[in-house]
Image (spheres, helix red, strand yellow):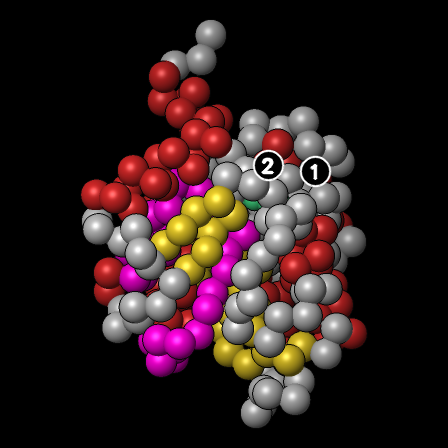
Amino acid sequence: MLTSAQKQLKDIFFCPEESNFYAYCLETLVLNHCMGSESIIELGSGDGSPVIKSLLRSRSNGVIHGFELNKLACEAANSKIREYGLSENYIIHNRSFFDSVRPQATYLVSNPPYLPALDNKIYQPLLHGGIDGITVTKKLLTLDYENVLVMVSSYSNPEGLIDYAITKSYYTSNFIVSPLTFGYYSSEPKVKDRIWELQKNNMAFCSNNIYLLAGVLFTKRHKAKTDISTELVQVMRSLA
Ligand SMILES: C[S@@+](CC[C@H](N)C(=O)[O-])C[C@H]1O[C@@H](n2cnc3c(N)ncnc32)[C@H](O)[C@@H]1O
């Protein structure tokens, strides 16, 4: 029998530490560099709090189109958006990002599903990132957006992801890293077991209770001035 707190965690993604860090990355790496005319789209808005926080703190008054598959999360997000008077700035579509006709955008942003597990039978199936955690993020990098801000975990084959980004003509143009403690979703035994397997194969870097999460801005090669992929790999491997 689930307690109501556990049920809520299973219904809508809830990890304030991670969401707040995503909000900070959005504000610092994207919104503070937008002049207002840039359009932004988002995969996986959750309860909307990261984008709402970053919009309230930044100078940006552009429009962000978010796509969120989870109906309950979408309803929670829309109610927060109304509460903060941001209905003109943040529009959430209750549809799959990949199956939708998406508006043109200069930035694609996401704290994507990145939990590694052998299949998606985990607490929240929509947080499954494939067997090494980067399946959804890789798919985002195939869509040819000029700038992609994604959250990258040190336990989800970060080097594989950076190598993949390079094959898709992306440079790492900026990143911010924070240590996070394993939370409710990443501590699920099935996920943890997979992380230890990846660690044995040098595809996950973490200690017993800490991993690193990076907000990484990938930019198409012809637009990026510098590539700091090597520095990012070094940082992500620092818990090896
Ligand atoms: C790690 S959570 C991030 C939520 C929120 N952005 C945050 O940081 O608090 C990932 C979100 O992506 C959603 N999601 C997964 N696959 C999706 C898809 N194909 N289209 C739209 N949303 C998706 C999940 O339901 C989940 O809410």
Residue stretch rendered in magenta on the structure: 32-55
The answer to whether 110 appears left or right of 193 in the picture is left
Q: Is residue 170 visible?
A: yes
Q: Nearer the viewer, residue 13 or 146?
A: 146
Amino acid residing under circle 2: Leu
Residue at 65% across / 59% down in the picture? 140
Q: Quadrant of the C terminus?
A: bottom right
Residue 17 percent location from the top left of the image: 36, 49
Q: Quadrant of residue 146?
A: bottom right
Q: Is residue 39 magenta?
A: yes
Q: Which mark is residue 117?
A: 1
Q: Is residue 212 visible?
A: no
Q: Nearer the viewer, residue 99 or 164?
A: 99
Residue farthest to the bottom?
Answer: 225
Say which residue label 2 marks.
126
Residue at 21% across / 49% down in the picture? 84
Q: Is residue 97 magenta?
A: no
Q: Nearer the viewer, residue 47 or 92?
A: 92
Residue 92 percent location from the top left of the image: 43, 47
Mark 2 nearby-residue class (10 Å; few <14, some 14–19, many ≥20) = some
> Which of marks 1 and 2 precedes in the sequence?
1
Does dot 1 land on a helix, a strand or a loop? Answer: loop
